[in-house]
Amino acid sequence: MSVKNKEIIMPSLSLTRDTQKAKEYFENKVAFTTGPVEVSHLLEKKASDIHVVDVRYAEDYVKGHVPGAVNLPPSEWGGDVSKKLDKNKINMLYCYSQVCHLAAKAAVKLASMGYAVMEMDGGFKAWTEHKLKVE
C-alpha cells in the first residue's frame, strides 16, 4: 500500500508566516526561559536574584531535585504561596521534561499573582542529562 492510500494522522499544526508574531514569540522565549547549564552556573555563583522552584509532585521532588529548590506542587498553586516564593527574586520554575507543561502553567498562575517567573527548559530530565548536581 502506498503512502498516498494510507491515512496519516498528524497533530494539528498552526503554521504561520507571520514574522511579527515569530519575532515576539522568540523575544519572549529568550526573556523567560533558560537552560539547565545556565541555571547551574547561576547557582554556583550564588546569584542572589534567583529562587529555584520545583513544580513537580512532592513524591518526585523527594527522590531528587535541583540543589536549593523548593517544592511547589500543583495542589499548592491556589493557596498561600508566599512562604515558598519570593516577590523580590526571579522564581526559576521547572517540571519533569521538555514535554511537561506544569512549569508553564505555574508560571501563568504565579505571574498573575505578581511573581517574577522564568522557566528552565527541559525540566529535571534535562538537568540530570547534563549530569548536574542533585539533592
Image (cartoon, rainbow, N blue to C red):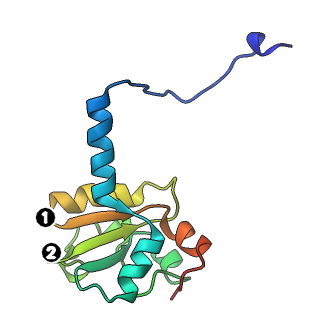
What secondary structure is found at the residue carrying circle 1? loop
Query: What's under tag 1, amino acid-wise?
Result: Gly
Q: Residue at x 27, y 78 (%)?
A: 50
Q: Decide which of tag 2 and tag 1 comes sooner along the chain.
A: 2
Q: Is residue 46 above or below residue 60?
A: below
For label 2, count other residues whose C-alpha is less than 10 Å away and answer few (under 14), some (14-19) or many (20+).
Answer: some
Which residue carries the number 2 mark? 87
- Residue 75: x, y in percent? 35, 67
Query: What's under tag 2, amino acid-wise?
Result: Lys
User: Is mark 2 in CB contact (under 8 Å) with mark 1?
Assistant: yes
Of residues 67 and 21, which is closer to you in this image? 21
Which residue carries the number 1 mark? 114
Q: Residue at x 53, y 85 (%)?
A: 134
Q: Is residue 110 rendered to the left or right of residue 33?
A: left
Q: Residue furthest top?
A: 5
Displayed quadrant of residue 94 = bottom left
Q: Is residue 3 rendered to the left or right of residue 1?
A: left
